[in-house]
Amino acid sequence: MQALLFSVTNSFSDLFLRVFTPGFKNGNLGIILLMDQQFKKIIQKTKALKEDLDPLAKTFEGALFKDSSWVFSFDESVQVESAPAPVVAAAAPVKKEVQERPKTGALSLVLFVGDTYAEGKGEDLLGKMIQAMKLKPGEFNRIQFDEKLDDINDLAGNLTTPSAETTNLIEQIEKFKPEIVVSLGATVTNILLGKREKLSGIHGQFFDKSAGSYHYNLMPLFHPDFLVINPNMKRTAWIDLQKVMERVGKI
């Protein structure tokens, strides 16, 4: 939003300086033409943001807030007269090749495991992330974090002889049959991998895993609680989530 506001502010600053600088000519006509140019730029910038054509729209914050009251609104029904554009022969439409995803037997697209959000307690950052990913109800599920998972030390042995909590987690994955499991934070990630890894070195990567006879892709992500404390990491998380979106056909 700062980028858009900066652009709008600069446009009006430029207009102010030109109008009130001594020697400015052409009087009211010059002011009207200049205002017309500046508003066209603002409208183009806003439209590009709303249509995901502006680089700002590709960020996590842009995806979350582009429809908020901060964004300069405009009415597309209002047309501004301008010089007619030269007639150019229309190019043949380019067919976009849609690659069909292989059938995996998945019941849902994404399963988020390790969720700690409780209704009415703090910010539901994960919910906002899911909304920004364009995931609809029925396409995703959220599994709450079991604190007893913190007590597991033998990660490799836990996959062979899983604890009750691990068994429940695996059964949930089998139940929802997602294409991708997003593990939130290091604890759940290490349990599903069966080994201890630094999240900073493996986040955003895909791992082939199985829950019983069901096979799925695992992608570790920084926990939303960590992102609240370290907001500068939201961009990194959003880049990782865009990889998930691409795999499930959301971009």
Image (spheres, grey):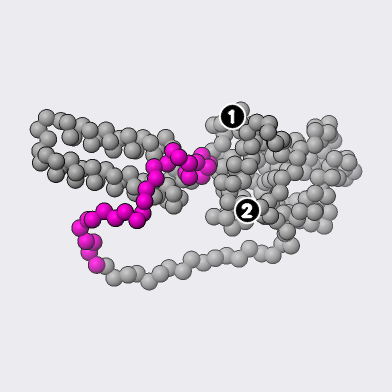
Residue 136 circle label: 2
Is there any visible trace of residue 201 in the rendered image?
no
Of residues 80 and 173, the one drawn nearer to the viewer in this rendering: 80
Q: Is residue 56 left or right of residue 149?
A: left
Give the structural element (helix, strand or loop) at label 1: loop
Tell me residue 161's x, y (percent): 90, 43
The quarter in which the N terminus is drawn is: top left
The residue under the point 57% across, 65% down is: 99
Query: Hey, which quadrant is residue 26 in on the image?
Result: top left
Q: Is residue 81 magenta?
A: yes
Question: Does dot 2 land on a helix, a strand or a loop?
Answer: loop
Q: CA distance from mark 2 to mark 1?
A: 27 Å
Overall secondary structure of the magenta stretch? loop
Residue 107 percent location from the top left of the image: 73, 59
Q: In x, y percent, where is residue 12?
A: 28, 36
Tell me where residue 126 sits by quadrant: top right
Which of the image's four quarters has the C terminus? Answer: bottom right
Q: Quadrant of residue 11?
A: top left
Q: Amino acid at mark 2?
A: Lys
Q: Which residues are magenta?
A: 60-87
Residue 149 visible (yes or no): yes
* Total residue callouts: 2
Name the residue tied to disc 1: 230
Task: Say which residue appears at 68% left-offset and 55% top-offset.
Answer: 138
Residue sitting at 48 percent across and 41 percent down?
68
Residue furthest top in the image: 229
